[in-house]
Image (cartoon, helix red, strand yellow):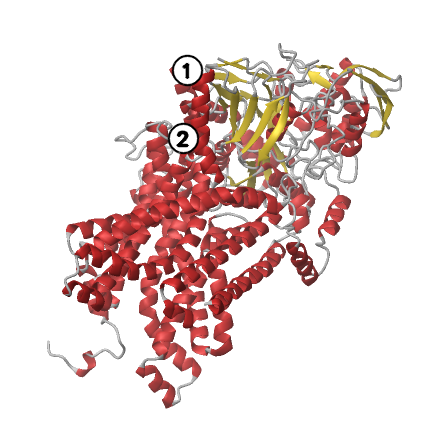
């Protein structure tokens, strides 16, 4: 009930205040998204929705520039030992955590130890084979690895390596408290509704690609959950919300109206791809996998659903990520060819009287369910009956893994439209090196090729190694790239909001934002 | 025609021949019957009458408003909405029949046994039924779906299970009333066995009420299934189920309102039809209520 | 009276107890390994899964699990959600007020609109007003409320731009409350009409009229008060239906209540949250029933002694 009373008082108070203070009223920015964060704890979630809020509350040792290259941030410099196993970071002086305690090497050690501790981070393996983190002095921290890991420095620019202050020891951490060094402080999180953030007056930016090196100009950033695209559109129109993802089909109309700005993120690192259950028929046979690839036409599907806002992606890693090369990948790709698909299926014994029955897993959001229906229809035309099952990403991860691990089930193997967003080709190691993130396709040859991508530090050599992996994955039809980006990359912004930027790998930044 | 002894009905209730006629005289019954008949007709003849294949994408340009080529417009895949509505009638009938079938037969059995047995058997059974009833049907249905997974078949069964308490309670109250009637007491005193008492004496007198409740129950089942499909827990793509079509229309309400209007209208009319039919049947079978 | 209240409380307690049993059984009905289904995503190894299994006590026989569940329940611990690893009770308590707001607002609308319509129809019985109201009512009963919600959203939010639904303030309560309320108003209208017709036919009303009492006095003091009794009896049921209906309406309008939470939990197979929700829901409905039954007993003393 208090909410209704507050709801009545709030507009009255704000109205009165605005009248007298005339412009000195609180500058709030409301950003509406289709879903909520899973947790404020960077070790307990993997969704993009969660990451984007961690970006505001926490900071990372390194940061990505506009092109996705890592550079110094909280760490002002570092050295790597000759054997490539010991990293020593020097931190900037004078950084404060939101509760006033200083940010120093102890906080870095706290974060790393926690990621590997009793309740380890969900992205523990992305840190690499770390054996220990030592505090050399308050501004120097040393991290030791057991083997070389080429993707470590890029990882330190990514939100999963967000630096968590060591004062986060309460068991409310992650659900109602979160102390970091980021541009915004946490005020509160009402699950399913909104996360309220207030500007951090002590903030200083060292490495992020924004113009304003001090605290944000706006007073508060409110990240609200509004699952319905039409409702977000209505809220944009009434001015309740300043930044939101609009419904795709309304974008041409919005552009024509000319009031709201449409911002399209680049270099999102998002890749949507086919992967298959390898442990059982039908997809243990490469012909079935190739048939699915030949039978579906991603270009047509994305043209229908996204207009010109999306691109075909031939590689297993997205544009903007090291190793991506459309021409290289296209050589090994499967161009739309339903006749070839039918021929392969016929070889396997399937045909019009004996259709191949299977299930396609898709996760919610990004209009992927619509693409799934188009693919379903295309597959039906070559004699593949694919039932669609839509679920949230967490459930899909678990079910894909369960499918791969089930070698004896009489039910047909499934395939799925999986998505991953990553800033480095190391994601391929995480997905496909045994035991594999989903216990899926793996071979000893692939393992060797993947290990090479991890331990090679020299750029030119690493490129060759990554290309070898891409070739292997595509020739074996294990990871078939479809399109990029995949979700949340289009924003509609109110005209009075200036300075809204989306950094590489889909990190919206609000430090430069001003509201006129 | 002269009246003869054989014309007098053996049990309480209208004669078979007069039933339909009586139904048609009440406005509720007539309209209800007409709507339901239309639904059945649509379901049976969909394959011949529908102008396009309901699953065929790009049967026309995407997101077209109603036109001569597409009387109800096209959806965001270019599929013909009218054809999907017609095929959807089939799914709707299936849902209604199966869900009510499950809940009615199970609830009937439960209510008969509880009402007849009396004593602690009755108390325990009806207490259980009451508890399940208080969970509300949607929560029971959600639980079933959470356990066994989503999909139209699972949704039909879930709704069927969720409505069992309702039918059990109705049967139970009718049985309690019938047990006090002279014909029943007479049968007991004559020494009729349990099974005979339940199936020959009680059951036929419970049936009229159940017909009314069952007819109304079809509308509840249809609404529930549409609701679950709307939430994404029932019908899955590309099934042309009306609730699912409504859910697909949500993103496009401003761009293509016809995608939202026609499936909703179809559901509303179907539910209205069964509601009116149920009311009409009640008027015929229970003349005391006719005044209302 | 006290005895009656105690009886009702005991009945509610039994309902809640059975709910706890049902909820414990639930997780074991899931085909496959529940731990794997809940936690087996991305990078968990079989050893980590076993550790989770032991931590949750899922390797124990079912009746021991039940006892642990009850013990934790008394400490207010409903477990932790799988998504985001948060205490289930906290999540439910945070989001419940929104559902309560919606349910009460809808109930208010349903009572005001439905009872007025039903009352008026009964009063003008036999006229076209009566027939018209009842047509309206039966149409209202037949309409899927998620469709009504979409229609109202289309009309008021998108076309006319009068109302919006982002944000949890009272303005965004209007559309969802209207949707849920109007749907139930139709039901209440029919019930009120039947109840009122019964009353108007009763002897004591005719006696009052014959005595020469003014019509309004008869209507309000005598008829309405007695008519309220069966309607209050139905209100308990209505509250349960409204809570159930809120689940769908919250979804249409993205209203941040426990209903929407339940749907998200079912999709995510967040079993601790689903279990917590069912128990919570059963408790709320049981408590509401007690309140309504006691209110009913106040209005109609005969009930206390049955």
Q: Secondary structure at mark 2?
A: loop
Percent position of residue C162, x then y: 35, 29
Figure check: A168 above or below C272: above
B108 or B68: nearer the eye?
B108
Q: Quadrant of residue A217 in the image?
A: top right
Label 2: few (<14), some or many (≥20) within 10 Å?
many
The quadrant in which residue A91 appears is top right
The numbered mark at residue A259 is 1
Residue toward you, A478 or A399? A399
Seen in the picture, residue A13 relative to B91 is either above or below; the reply is above
Please state if B106 lies on the left or on the right of A330 as rendered: left
In-image side of B100 versus A309 (left or right): left
Front disc: 2 or 1: 2
Image point (20%, 81%), residue name:
B6
Q: Vertical placement of C208 versus B115: above or below? A: above
Q: Position of residue A63 (x, y in %)?
A: 70, 17
Q: Position of residue C128 (x, y in %)?
A: 16, 50
The residue that mark 2 highlights is C164
Chain containing mark 1: A
Foreground residue, B158 or C260? C260
Q: Secondary structure at mark 1?
A: loop
Seen in the image, is B225 located left or right of residue A322?
left
Image label count: 2
Instruction: Examine the rendering and report whether any part of residue A158 can be seen.
Output: yes
């Amino acid at each position: 009930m208090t909410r209704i009373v507050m709801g009545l008082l709030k507009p009255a108070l704000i109205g009165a205040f605005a009248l007298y203070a005339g412009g000195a009223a609180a500058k709030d920015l409301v950003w509406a998204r289709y879903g909520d964060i899973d947790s404020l704890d960077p070790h307990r979630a993997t969704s993009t929705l969660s990451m984007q809020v961690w970006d505001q509350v926490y900071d990372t040792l390194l940061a990505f520039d506009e092109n996705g290259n890592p550079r110094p941030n909280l760490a002002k410099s570092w050295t790597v030992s000759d054997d490539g196993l010991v990293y020593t970071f020097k931190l900037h002086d004078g950084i404060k955590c939101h509760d006033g305690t200083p940010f120093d090497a102890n906080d870095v050690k706290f974060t790393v130890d926690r990621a590997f501790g009793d309740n380890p981070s969900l992205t523990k393996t992305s840190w690499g084979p770390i054996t220990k983190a030592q505090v050399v002095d308050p501004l120097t921290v040393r991290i030791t690895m057991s083997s070389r890991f080429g993707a470590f420095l890029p990882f330190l620019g990514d939100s999963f390596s967000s630096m968590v202050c060591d004062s986060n020891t309460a068991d409310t951490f992650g659900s109602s408290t979160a102390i970091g060094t980021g541009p915004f402080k946490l005020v509160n999180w009402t699950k399913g509704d909104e996360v309220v953030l207030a500007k951090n007056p002590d903030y200083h930016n060292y490495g992020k690609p924004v113009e304003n090196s001090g605290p944000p100009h706006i007073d508060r950033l409110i990240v609200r959950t509004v699952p319905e695209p039409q409702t977000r559109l209505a809220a944009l129109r009434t001015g309740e919300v300043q930044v939101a993802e609009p419904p795709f089909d309304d974008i041409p109309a919005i552009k024509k109206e000319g009031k709201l700005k449409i911002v399209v993120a680049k270099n999102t690192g998002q890749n949507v791809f086919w992967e298959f259950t390898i442990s059982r028929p039908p997809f243990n046979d490469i012909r079935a996998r190739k048939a699915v690839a030949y039978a579906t036409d991603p270009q047509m599907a994305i043209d229908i659903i996204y207009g010109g806002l999306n691109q075909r992606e031939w590689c297993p890693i997205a544009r903007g990520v090291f190793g991506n090369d459309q021409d290289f990948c296209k050589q090994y790709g499967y161009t739309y060819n339903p006749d070839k698909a039918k021929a392969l299926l016929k070889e396997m014994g399937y045909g019009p009287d004996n259709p191949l029955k299977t299930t396609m897993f898709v996760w919610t959001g990004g209009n992927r369910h619509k693409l799934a229906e188009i693919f379903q229809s295309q597959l039906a035309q070559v004699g593949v009956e694919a039932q669609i099952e839509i679920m949230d990403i967490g459930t899909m991860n678990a079910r894909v893994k369960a499918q791969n691990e089930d070698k004896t089930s009489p039910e047909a193997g499934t395939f799925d439209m999986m998505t991953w967003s990553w800033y480095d080709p190391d994601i391929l190691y995480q997905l496909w090196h045994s035991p594999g993130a989903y216990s899926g396709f793996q071979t000893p040859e692939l393992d060797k090729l993947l290990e090479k991508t991890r331990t090679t530090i020299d750029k030119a050599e690493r490129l060759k190694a990554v290309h070898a992996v891409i070739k292997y994955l595509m020739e074996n039809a294990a990871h078939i790239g479809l399109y990029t980006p995949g979700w949340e990359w289009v924003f509609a912004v109110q005209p009075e909001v200036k300075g809204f930027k989306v950094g590489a790998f889909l990190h919206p930044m609000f430090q430069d934002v001003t509201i006129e | 025609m002269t009246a003869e002894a054989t014309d007098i009905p053996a049990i309480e209730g209208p004669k078979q021949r007069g039933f339909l006629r009586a139904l048609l005289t009440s406005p509720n019954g007539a309209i209800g019957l007409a709507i339901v008949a239309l639904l059945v007709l649509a379901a049976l003849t969909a394959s011949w009458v529908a102008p396009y294949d309901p699953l065929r994408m790009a049967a026309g340009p995407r997101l077209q408003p109603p036109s001569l080529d597409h009387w109800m417009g096209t959806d965001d895949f270019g599929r013909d909405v009218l054809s999907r509505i017609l095929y959807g009638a089939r799914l709707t009938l299936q849902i209604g029949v199966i869900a009510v079938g499950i809940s009615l037969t199970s609830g009937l059995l439960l209510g008969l046994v509880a009402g007849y047995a009396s004593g602690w058997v009755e108390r325990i059974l009806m207490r259980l039924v009451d508890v399940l009833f208080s969970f509300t049907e949607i929560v029971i249905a959600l639980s079933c779906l959470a356990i066994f997974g989503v999909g139209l078949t699972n949704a039909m069964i879930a709704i069927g299970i969720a409505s069992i308490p309702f039918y059990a309670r109705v049967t139970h109250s009718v049985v309690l009333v019938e047990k006090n009637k002279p014909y029943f007491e007479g049968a007991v005193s004559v020494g009729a066995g349990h099974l005979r008492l339940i199936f020959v004496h009680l059951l036929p007198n419970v049936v009229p009420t159940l017909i009314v409740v069952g007819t109304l129950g079809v509308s509840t089942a249809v609404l529930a299934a549409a609701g679950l499909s709307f939430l994404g827990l029932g019908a899955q793509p590309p099934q042309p189920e009306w609730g699912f079509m409504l859910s697909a229309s949500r993103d496009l309400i401003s761009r293509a309102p016809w995608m939202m209007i026609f499936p909703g209208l179809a559901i509303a009319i179907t539910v209205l039809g069964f509601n009116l039919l149920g009311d009409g049947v009640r008027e015929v079978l229970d003349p005391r209520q006719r005044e209302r | 009276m006290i005895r009656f209240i105690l009886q009702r409380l005991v009945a509610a307690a039994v309902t809640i107890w059975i709910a706890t049993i049902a909820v414990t059984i639930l997780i074991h009905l899931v085909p496959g390994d529940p731990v794997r289904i809940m936690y087996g995503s991305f990078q968990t190894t079989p050893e980590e899964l076993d550790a989770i299994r032991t931590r949750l006590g899922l390797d124990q026989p079912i009746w021991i699990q039940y006892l642990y569940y009850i013990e934790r329940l008394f400490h207010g611990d409903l477990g932790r959600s799988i998504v985001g690893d948060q205490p289930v009770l906290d999540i439910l308590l945070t989001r419940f007020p929104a559902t309560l707001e919606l349910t009460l607002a809808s109930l208010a609308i349903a009572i005001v609109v439905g009872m007025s319509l039903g009352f008026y129809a009964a009063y003008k019985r036999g006229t076209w007003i009566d027939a018209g109201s009842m047509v309206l009512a039966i149409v209202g009963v037949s309409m899927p409320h998620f469709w009504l919600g979409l229609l109202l959203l289309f009309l008021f939010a998108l076309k006319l731009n009068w109302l919006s639904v982002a944000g949890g303030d009272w303005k965004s309560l209007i559309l969802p409350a209207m949707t849920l309320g109007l749907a139930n108003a139709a039901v209440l209208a029919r019930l009120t009409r039947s109840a009122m017709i019964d009353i108007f036919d009763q002897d004591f009303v005719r006696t009052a009229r014959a005595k020469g009492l003014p019509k309004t006095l008869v209507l309000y003091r005598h008829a309405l008060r007695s008519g309220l009794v069966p309607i209050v009896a139905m209100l308990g049921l209505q509250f349960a239906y409204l809570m159930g209906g809120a689940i769908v309406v919250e979804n249409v309008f993205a209203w941040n209540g426990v209903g929407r939470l339940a749907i998200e939990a079912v999709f995510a197979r967040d079993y601790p949250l689903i279990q917590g929700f069912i128990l919570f829901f059963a408790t709320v409905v049981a408590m509401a029933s007690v309140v309504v039954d006691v209110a009913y007993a106040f209005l109609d003393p005969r009930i206390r002694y049955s």
